[in-house]
Amino acid sequence: MKRPAPPDVPKILGQLKGFQRDTVEYAFQRLYLDADSSRRFLVADEVGLGKTLVARGVIARTIEHLWEAVDRIDVIYICSNANIARQNMNRLNVLDDEPSGLASRITLLPLHLRDLDSRKVNLIGLTPGTSFEMTGGTGVVRERVLLYWLLREAWDFGAHAGPMNLFQVDAGSERFRRVIKAFPSSGEDGGLPYDRSVADEFLRQLQRDIEGKRRAGESDLRSRFDELRHLFGWTRSQIPKKDRQLRNAFIGELRNLLARACLTSLEPDLVIMDEFQRFRDLFDGDHPAAELAQGLFEYADESTRSVS
């Protein structure tokens, strides 16, 4: 495989206005070079002054700085919605011969890790609503299919209707079953498409969660699954509200565990937060999304930096 070339930093910074270049250089200085360097930096310019271009400059300088020091460079870009993420990631891409990046849900990273490992630089776009706020929703079909197969591997429940109905949620029955059936052979080598290390970490976290709940005398995920698989053991055109709530809470907790496992697969060197003021809940310890977000921001590697 051809080794990619590092970013052309003089060319990238040459496209900026003077005050934008000054901001890039000062931010980079504070993040990486100063003796009392900071792990976080806030750019508080007004709308229209080119904060995205400043972020692009900081990304270029960071990649240049880390190019020989690490095998894989991960840049995480967090913004308010997926459409903005896809649009801005094209602008933030600083490598001419590399793809612009991946805009995804954090829980779907197990399906993409092989691609990430094959590249020197990864630009990964995430949104709070799809990557941190897990407990209130059931996610998309691919998330639920992934969870179904992870649990089937762990608990060996076979191809019974109950678990399929449980994870189907509002998807069409025939379509959902087609996706379930095709999933195990949808990987590049005709096998399971998810990353083994993330799957193993999810299963470890799942078991720890179950053991912790049992020690505390609380209802655990395995016990709740056994109840739900029987509750959803037949097809119903109308599902009572109480049953929907039990199902949604169960899937939401699984998504949260999977998101935690996925955090271990990311090694963020730089986190960019677009429109920081929109994400105050991610820094509120009482908010359900905050713990997951803090796990990303406070990644143990001391090389990680964040710009808002």
Image (spheres, helix red, strand yellow):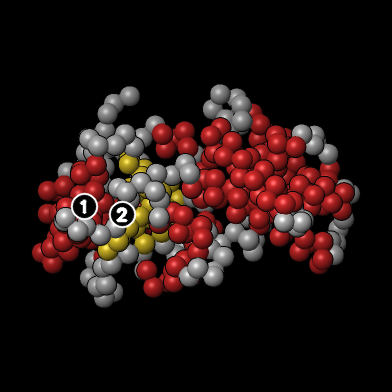
**Residue that numbered label 1 is attached to:** 32
Which class describes the residues within 10 Å of circle 1: few (<14), some (14-19), or many (20+)?
Answer: some
Can you tell which quarter of the image residue 56 is in? bottom left
Q: Secondary structure at mark 1?
A: helix
Q: Are marks 2 and 1 in contact (CB under 8 Å)?
A: yes
Residue at (49%, 39%) from the top-left corner?
112
| Quadrant holding the N terminus | top left
Q: Is residue 192 visible?
A: yes
Q: Which image quarter: residue 95?
A: top left
Query: Measured along the vertical axis of the image, is residue 265 above or below residue 169?
Result: above
**Left or right for 265, reference 18:** right
Q: Nearer the viewer, residue 37 or 104?
A: 37
Asked where in the image residue 306 lies, by quadrant, the reply is bottom left
Give the residue type that dot 2 points to.
Arg
Q: What kind of residue is marked 1?
A: Tyr
> Which quarter of the figure is the C terminus placed in?
bottom left
Q: Position of residue 288 (x, y in %)?
A: 57, 65
Question: How many neighbours does mark 2 have within 10 angstroms: few (below 14), some (14-19), or many (20 or more)?
Answer: many
* Image mark for residue 305: 2
Tally of marks: 2
Front residue of 211 and 223: 211
Give 158 or 32, whichever is nearer the viewer: 32
